[in-house]
Amino acid sequence: MSVLPGAEPYLHQGDGPTGVLLCHGFTGCPQSLRPWAEYLADAGLAVSLPRLPGHGTTWQDLARTRWEDWYAAIDRAYDELRTTTDEIFVTGLSMGACLALRLAELRGEDVRGLVLVHHSV
């Protein structure tokens, strides 16, 4: 499996207690949210922008994955971010917003806030 250029995950250790987990959308990759992630990092926040399984490679890789795989990646990224932060805000673009909502549902009050984005052309 070869990751397309720009599809790599992004991780930044922040200067304070606050972290942000960003979730890209279906058929997307971290590149679609990278400017937002870098903006948050420049503001001193810890930032995690994982690449969802099957995304950012080939359609064949994507065809072998399910939503549970994508959610598991977000859940792992949340746990990793939690080791270095006191509070986490979760953001999601399109399908990533659905994953963010599921995470907030299961994590409850541990998720400090949500930012959900949908765009259409």
Image: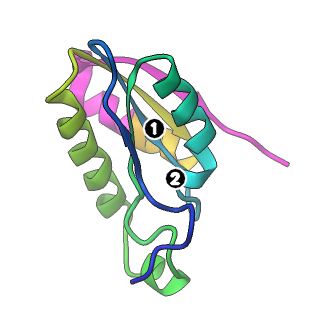
Compared to 39, does 110 lie above or below? above
Residue 75 covered by magenta stretch: no
Instruction: Residue 7 in the image: state x and y as whole percent.
Output: 52, 62
Residue carrying label 2 = 30
Q: Residue 36's quadrant in the figure?
A: top right
- Neighbour class for label 2 at 10 Å: few (<14), some, many (≥20)? many
Between 72 and 9, the one nearer to me in the picture: 9
| Residue at the limit of the structure toward the right, as seen here | 121
Between 65 and 12, the one nearer to me in the picture: 12
- Neighbour class for label 1 at 10 Å: few (<14), some, many (≥20)? many
Residues rendered magenta in the picture: 101-121
Q: Is there CB contact under 8 Å for labels 2 and 1?
A: yes
Q: Which residue is drawn at 54% across and 58% down?
A: 29
Residue carrying label 1 = 22
Compared to 116, does 74 lie above or below? below
Q: Which amino acid does label 2 sit on?
A: Pro
Between 78 and 117, the one nearer to me in the picture: 78
Colour scheme of this structure image?
rainbow
Tell whether 88 sits left or right of 43.
left
Q: Which amino acid does label 1 sit on?
A: Leu
Q: Is mark 2 on a helix, strand or loop?
A: helix
Q: Residue 109's quadrant in the figure?
A: top left
Instruction: Residue 64 in the image: state x and y as whole percent.
Output: 38, 81
Instruction: Residue 79 in the image: state x and y as whole percent.
Output: 18, 37
